[in-house]
C-alpha cells in the first residue's frame, strides 16, 4: 500500500528516470554500457525513498519534534494545552490516520505559525492562537497540520533531505533508547532545521488546506474557519517579524484563500457552513494565554 | 521582569485595540450584496470589484458587511480581499477581536487577575536553523495529550457530530 502510494504520488520516478538517463548517457560517451553503475544508481535512489513504518516514523518524529521544541518551548499552561489537544485529537480522529499517537502543543512565540511533525506531533504558536476567534478556526488550522502528517509530506521530505537511509538508522536508534547524541538524532535534527526553515512545496500546502477544511467539517465544525484564519493573516503586515517564518515557508494567504475558494465551491462545502463555530468556548479557553509564561 | 511585563502589556493593548478597529476589505470581483447569508437570498445591489466594505461578522462562508454608504448586507467570504494593515508594524487582525482587546484592558486594570506574559520570544528562520534539540520538552508535552474518549466527550459538550464529508477535488488554475 505504502510503497504504491509513494510511486504514484512522488516525484521520485521522474528523478529515477532522469538519473538512469544521465547514467546511460555518461556510459555511452565512455564507450560502453556499464550495467553495475546503472544498478547502483537504481539502488541508491530506491534506498532514499524506502517508506518508513509507523514505528520508524514515530522515531523520526521524536527527533524532529525535539529539534523544533528546541527553537520554541511549550507554554506552561496545562488548561490551554489540554484544550488544544482535545480539539486536535477530535479533528485527527476524522482523518485516515486516527490511531497515530497525536500530541499537540502550544509553543511560546508571538509569531504566527504552526508545524506538523511526522508521527503525530502538531505545534501551534501562541501568536497564531491570538489571531483566531473561534474553535472552528482552530480546528481548521489544526486540520491543515493534521493533513500534513496524514499525507506524510514532512516525513518524505525529511528522508529525502537527509540524503540518508533514515529508516535503517531508526532501527538502530531504537536500541539506543532516545539518546540525543546518536548519529540518527543528529541527522534528523539537521534535516529538520533545513526543512522547517525552508518549507514544503507549495502544492503540499494547498493539498493540506484542501484536506484540512474537510477534516474540520467531518468533526462537525464550520469548515470556513480556515478561510477566516487565512483572511485574518491577509490583514497582518507581511513585512512584520510575526509573519516572517510563515511567509518564508507557505504560499501567500491570499493565494491560499483563492485556491480554497474554488475548491470549496466545487465540493459544495456551503452545506456545512452552519455547523458549530465554538466562539464562546474558544475565547473562554484562550484568554489565559495572556497570563502564561515560558515553561523553563 | 515586572517592568518588562508592563511595557509589553502596554504594547499588546495598543496592538489589540488597533486590531479591533481594523476590519476593512475590498471586493475582488463583481458580486451581489445579499439580504441574507444564502446564495438564493435577494440581492440588494450588485457591487463592482474594488468596492470598500467593513466587516461586521461571519456566518459560515458569508460576511455581514457594511458599505461606506451605511447600507449592509451579506457577501460570500471568498469574494473579498482583506486590506493589508501595513501601518501597525506587527499584529494586524480584523473584525471579531473585541474580546481580546477587552481582555488586555482588564489585564491592565487587574480586575480579572490577567497579567501580561513575560518571556515572549520570536520565532524566525534563524531560530529554526540553529535549534538545539530538547527531547525533554518532547517527553513533557505528552502529559497534556487527550484520549479518544476524552476527545469524544469534549466534542459532545459542544454538540459536535461527526459528518460524512468527501475530500475536495483539486481545481486547476484556481490561483490568482
Image: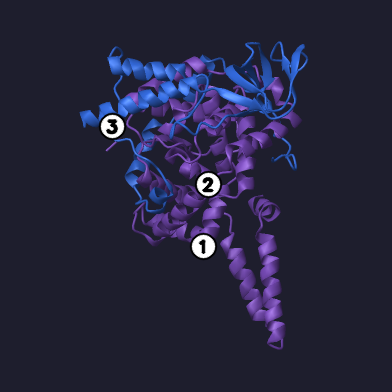
Is residue A224 something one can see in this rendering? no
Snapshot colouring: by chain
Circles 3 and 1 on the same chain:
no
Task: Tell me the colour chain B is drawn in.
Answer: blue
Note the chain letter of the purple one.
A
In this view, the residue in front, A289 or A110, is A110
Is residue A277 something one can see in this rendering? yes
Above or below B125: residue A169: below
> What element does badge 3 sit on?
loop
Earlier-in-chain disc, 1 versus 2: 1
Q: Which residue is mark 2?
A: A249
> What element does badge 2 sit on?
helix
Q: Nearer the viewer, mark 1 or mark 2?
A: 2
Q: Which residue is mark 3?
A: B118
Question: At which x and y percent is residue A91?
Answer: 56, 29
Determine the chain carrying the residue at label 2.
A
- Residue contact between numbered discs 3 and 2, judged by CB atoms under 8 Å: no
Amino acid at each position: 500500500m505504502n510503497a504504491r502510494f509513494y510511486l504514484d504520488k512522488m516525484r521520485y520516478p521522474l528523478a529515477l528516470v532522469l538519473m538512469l538517463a544521465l547514467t546511460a548517457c555518461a556510459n555511452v560517451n565512455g564507450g560502453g554500457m556499464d550495467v553495475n553503475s546503472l544498478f547502483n544508481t537504481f539502488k541508491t535512489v530506491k534506498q532514499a525513498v524506502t517508506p518508513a513504518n509507523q514505528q520508524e516514523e514515530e522515531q523520526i518524529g521524536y527527533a524532529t519534534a525535539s529539534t523544533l521544541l528546541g527553537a520554541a518551548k511549550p507554554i506552561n499552561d496545562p488548561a490551554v494545552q489540554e484544550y488544544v489537544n482535545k480539539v486536535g485529537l477530535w479533528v485527527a480522529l476524522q482523518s485516515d490516520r486516527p490511531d497515530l499517537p497525536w500530541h499537540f502543543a502550544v509553543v511560546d512565540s508571538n509569531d504566527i505559525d504552526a508545524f506538523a511533525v511526522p508521527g503525530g506531533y502538531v505545534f501551534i504558536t501562541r501568536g497564531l492562537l491570538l489571531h483566531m476567534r473561534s474553535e472552528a478556526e482552530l480546528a481548521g488550522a489544526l486540520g491543515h497540520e493534521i493533513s500534513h502528517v496524514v499525507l506524510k509530506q514532512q516525513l518524505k521530505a525529511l528522508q529525502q533531505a537527509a540524503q540518508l537511509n533514515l529508516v535503517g538508522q531508526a532501527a538502530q536508534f531504537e536500541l539506543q533508547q532516545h539518546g540525543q547524541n546518536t548519529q540518527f538524532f543528529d541527522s534528523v535534527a539537521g534535516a529538520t532545521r533545513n526543512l522547517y526553515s525552508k518549507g514544503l512545496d507549495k502544492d503540499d500546502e494547498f493539498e493540506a488546506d484542501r484536506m484540512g477544511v474537510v477534516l474540520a467539517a467531518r468533526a462537525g465544525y464550520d469548515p470556513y474557519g480556515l478561510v477566516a484564519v487565512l483572511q485574518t493573516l491577509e490583514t497582518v503586515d507581511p513585512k512584520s517579524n510575526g509573519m516572517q517564518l510563515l511567509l518564508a515557508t507557505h504560499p501567500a494567504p491570499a493565494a491560499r484563500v483563492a485556491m480554497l475558494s474554488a475548491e470549496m465551491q466545487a465540493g459544495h462545502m456551503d452545506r456545512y457552513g452552519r455547523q458549530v463555530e465554538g466562539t464562546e468556548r474558544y475565547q473562554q479557553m484562550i484568554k489565559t494565554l495572556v497570563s502564561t509564561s515560558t515553561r523553563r | 521582569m515586572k517592568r518588562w511585563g508592563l511595557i509589553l502589556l502596554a504594547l499588546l493593548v495598543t496592538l489589540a485595540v488597533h486590531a479591533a478597529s481594523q476590519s476593512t476589505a475590498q471586493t475582488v470581483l463583481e458580486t451581489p450584496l445579499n439580504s441574507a447569508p444564502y446564495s438564493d437570498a435577494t440581492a440588494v445591489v450588485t457591487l463592482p470589484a474594488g468596492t470598500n466594505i467593513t466587516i461586521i461578522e461571519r456566518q459560515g462562508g458569508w460576511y455581514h458587511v457594511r458599505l461606506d454608504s451605511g447600507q449592509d448586507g451579506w457577501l460570500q467570504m471568498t469574494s473579498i480581499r482583506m486590506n493589508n494593515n501595513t501601518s501597525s508594524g506587527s499584529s494586524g487582525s480584523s473584525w471579531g477581536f473585541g474580546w481580546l482587546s477587552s481582555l488586555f484592558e482588564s489585564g491592565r486594570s487587574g480586575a480579572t487577575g490577567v497579567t501580561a506574559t513575560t518571556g515572549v520570544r520570536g520565532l524566525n528562520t534563524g531560530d529554526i536553523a540553529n535549534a538545539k534539540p530538547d527531547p525533554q520538552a518532547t517527553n513533557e508535552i505528552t502529559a497534556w495529550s487527550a484520549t479518544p474518549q476524552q476527545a469524544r466527550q469534549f466534542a459532545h459538550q459542544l454538540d459536535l457530530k461527526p459528518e460524512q464529508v468527501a475530500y475536495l477535488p483539486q481545481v486547476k488554475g484556481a490561483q490568482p
